[in-house]
Amino acid sequence: MGNVKGLFKFADWYDIVLMFLGTVGAVGDGCSTNVLLLSASSVMNSLGYGSQTQQNHGVFMPELAKV
């Protein structure tokens, strides 16, 4: 039972669709944390200009809106 054929031996089309949807959901769940970290880091980079924020005060909200 070490091959893929053994996995699908007794599966009908409904089981195969459910396995496919489960695989897609698992990949999406694994990627969601990384996407959240990338988007949060963009927001933090927009907020963290430091001393440049005082000089470019009018640019702050447009930079944040780009994210």
Image (tube, grey):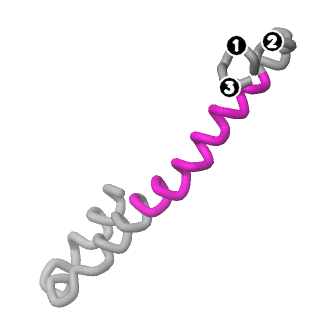
Badge 2 is on which residue? 9
Q: Position of residue 55 (x, y in %)?
A: 13, 84
Q: Identify which residue, 5 or 54, lies in the foreground.
A: 5
From the viewer's perspective, is 57 left or right of 12?
A: left
Q: Position of residue 21 (x, y in %)?
A: 71, 28
Q: How many marks?
A: 3
User: What residue lies at 28% left-to-right and 63% top-to-bottom?
Assistant: 62
User: Could you say whether the residue bearing mark 2 is in a helix, strand or loop?
Assistant: loop
Q: Tag 1: Cα neighbours inside 10 Å, few (<14), some, or many (≥20)? A: few
Q: Is residue 56 above or below residue 42?
A: below
Q: Which residues are magenta?
A: 18-38
Badge 3 is on which residue? 2
User: Could you say whether the residue bearing mark 1 is in a helix, strand or loop?
Assistant: helix
Quarter of the figure with residue 41: bottom left
Q: Is residue 46 above or below residue 15?
A: below
Give the CA distance from mark 2 to mark 1.
6 Å
